[in-house]
Amino acid sequence: MRRLKAPNAFIPVIVAFSAWEVASRVGLKEAILLPPPSDLLWTFLWLLKGKEFLWALVKSSLRVLIGLSLGASVGFAFGVLMGLKETLDRWLSPIFSLLYPIPSLGWLPLLLIWLGPGEGLSVALIFICSMFPVLYNTLTGIRGVPRELLYASKVLGASPLRTLKEVLLPLALPQILTGLRLEAGMAWRVLLAAEMIAIPTGIGALMWKAESLMRVDVILVCLGVLSFLCFAFERSFLWLERRFTRWR
Amino acid sequence: MVFSKKFFLSLSFIGCLILGYKTACWPFRFAVEYNAHSAPFWVALEKGWFQEAAIEVESYEAFLTGTALAAALQRKKIEVAYMCLAPALLAFCNANVPLRCLTLTHRYGYGLVVDPSKVKAVEDLSKVKVGCLREGTTVDLFMKGVYERYGGLQGHRKEEVLRMNPFLTVLALSRGQIGAAFLPEHWVSLAEQMGFKVLLSASDVFPKMPGSVLVVTEGLPAASALKLKEITERATRWLRDHPEEGARILSRHFAMNLPVDIGGEMPLPKPNEGVFLRAFSRMAFDSTLTEEDVKWTLELLLRYGYVSKSIDPKEVLWRP
Amino acid sequence: MEVRVEGLENFALKGVDLTVGEGEVVALVGPTGAGKTTLLNAIAGLVPYKGKVKIGQNPIDHLPPERRQVGYLFQGLALFPHMTVWENVAFGLKAKGLKGQALEQRVEEVLELLRISHLRGRYPKDLSGGEAQRVALGRTLAPWPRVLLLDEPFSKLDLRTSKYLRTEFKRLQRSLKITTIFVTHNVTEAFEMGDRVALMAEGKIQQVGIPEELMFKPSNDLVSRYFGGPNVFECRSFTPLDSGLAQVDVGGLLLLVPYTGKKITRISFLPWNVHLSKDPPPGPNVNRLMGAVEKVEHDPPFVRVELTVGPKRILVEMEEETYNHLGLRPKDHAYVVLPLRAIRTLESEL
């Protein structure tokens, strides 16, 4: 019996889009409420012509990058310190355990009052969203390094700093990068919600405006672009992961 | 027993009466905005004019914004609505909501309210955060008109305009989070009563600006639509002649239908008669809706990119 | 350099004294949990302890592990998975501050010595068991350690590779003359590799000595049992033969044993070096005896079988699986095979 090949990843997508195109054109769902993909392409090109869309993209992307960088850096620093110093871990772990379970968006009302609706708010939200997972992934990564490897490093004459730099951190890196990769998607979700509710600029705000104007086509184009952006972010981290963990 | 011709004729006549009554007494779901322009509805309800015209009000729902109301229209949850013209046209053009505008209820009535300690002139808006309703609302068009009139307000970034519903806008103004607010109708006078200053009215920027309309979904029986139009026009005329009583009716109904309540406490004062009376003084109750009015609003929506193409005003106006 | 351990005590060690001479290899054997690895860890400074450790004449108790200049080959090898072979070997040298030409030269030297130059660019995941072992050894030797500690270095390898590496290591150790403590659970390996063998049990060194001392003059029951006490026999007579062999009479049993020219007074063989078979074993008829099973003792995962062979009692130890395969019961008969190389002789001058 001939074995069926697994379909190329694009084929199901093409089939789905074609079905959508036909359904919209034929009128199974009102075209205005679910515009066909071909119309969305025109909407996308129209959006590109105007400054607002690109500016919204840039704004949102910068917010994610800045928030993620800050959150990851701080989370990483705490994770390393807590991984190396048990006393610090014992003091900070209970506090972080209380804060970590709070959904990132749950902080929005408080931050809105403290910081107001601006860049600070979006960056703060993404910071919170990414800091804790990176902290715990770093901690897990560091604790997961086999004790024998640390012994080997010491016995070979490496100072604690060299052991940290050349043994602990490189071995903890896969765990840290995996955490970052997963959090990148989360950061976008959190930002989107914040931009819809509280921040007047960015892709989320644009989508919210489109809802007010009942422009389903604009909303769908924004969703498509977001999907691509999240995918690009995730792939970038995956590339980083593979680049730095070739030894696995 | 022989059934005579007279018997059958009488039966038919009674049948027609019943049918006619049933058709005329089709229960309608109403939607109103939590705004002074819904006054004709409340007046008609209180005065029993719907009942008089055999119009059954099955239900009515108050929406905080016109766009929320437009969404409900689009989902076919209501048949009759009192809403601003701009969101009605957006729903028609962008979402193909099958609606028809029957009659106007008022012109202008919108205003720019400021914190006098922070804003003394319109040019000072560039120094503060400004609150406004969402894009596509009539208040938004008013705001854009103000910006155009006053040279784009150099230096005022988009981030400084916060889009909120009127309740939150007044709340933000009262807490000092914004320095100025573009508001509709009675919200202007509510803020005024709270100590803020009305710097500009819509009539200063757009003379003859159409405000709100009576809207019905396409397919509503013509007879019912005509009755609704007549009731609304009657209520509009009545309000012109009896503003004090109109204000009393509104304050009573608005107290019962508060859209926001946090833990049993209202963070803003309730709109009283004085608020509505003051709002009425800024509105011109008028029921003549023309193609020019629709065309004018459409041009603004087109200019600001809210609709991608214009339509023939006749398409959206109801004709018997 | 000589290594001296005096009165070492901690959670696992109960007062350990051991001296390893300069360039000497001491093989440390003992049951699981005896404290062998803990002793190595204490010498390396990886676990806290009370007592003294000296390298040469200098106490090193106050020094952290990175300054003790001890080479430690861990049981799991502990190769850095994220570094290539070259980088692994260079690690200790870089830690010492070696750079540039000097670093490269030394790394190449070590790679050549261990015959692993062709592996320099590979990661540990791409190495076979034997290759990984050599890389680990190279990394341990590269930074000129004063003392070498090996924790069961060949335990995870197949017989052939293990044998090959043991030979390699012996050659290296002889040429480098590096003081070594070598932990193994394989007594045969210990006898082969060690200049002296130390038995550790219950957190203490029970006896240190050459294999003959441990087998023929055990200091206590523990030592006697560990090195196969019951299988020590007095020689009534011996007859030298050609090819370095002699025939000995151990009181009714005639056996062929290795002969070095000296008078053989006693012979001994370890219980796990004796083979049993129900069917006639293949090969030449050398040291093949017939015995009757007297007693079977189960001590999982091992089984001890006591047999009567002629007038003598012989103790045989094997894995449970082997025993079950044989299916021997008391009063059963079985062939008893004593490999030549497994018999140790106690000699005196003629």
Image (cartoon, coloured by chain):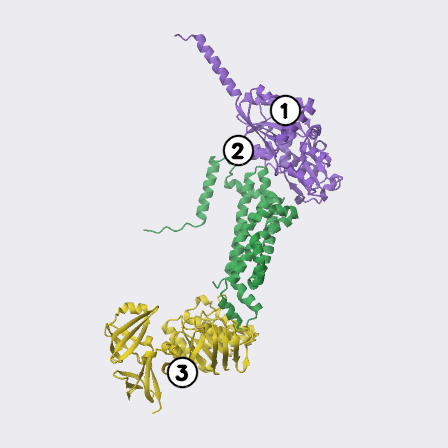
Chain colours: A green, B purple, C yellow
Q: Which mark is residue B75?
A: 2
Residue visible at 58% across and 33% down in the picture: B69
Q: Is residue A20 above or below residue B107?
A: below
Taking the view exactly as shown, the residue that stands out farthest to the bottom is C350
- Mark 2 and mark 1: span between their CA atoms? 27 Å
Mark 3 falls on what kind of element? loop
Q: Name the residue beneath numbered marker 1.
A: B43
- Mark 2 and mark 3: span between their CA atoms? 96 Å
Q: Position of residue C45 (x, y in %)?
A: 52, 73
Q: How many marks?
A: 3
Instruction: Indicate which disc, 2 or 1, sits on the residue closer to the N terminus.
Output: 1
Q: Nearer the viewer, residue A13 or A155?
A: A155
Q: Position of residue A38 (x, y in %)?
A: 51, 41
Between circles 2 and 1, the one closer to the viewer is: 1
Q: Is residue B63 above or below residue A223?
A: above
- Amino acid type shown at disc 1: Val
Q: Nearer the viewer, residue C112 or B233?
A: B233
Q: Nearer the viewer, residue C20 or C293?
A: C293
The image quadrant of residue B80 is top right
- Amino acid type shown at disc 3: Ile
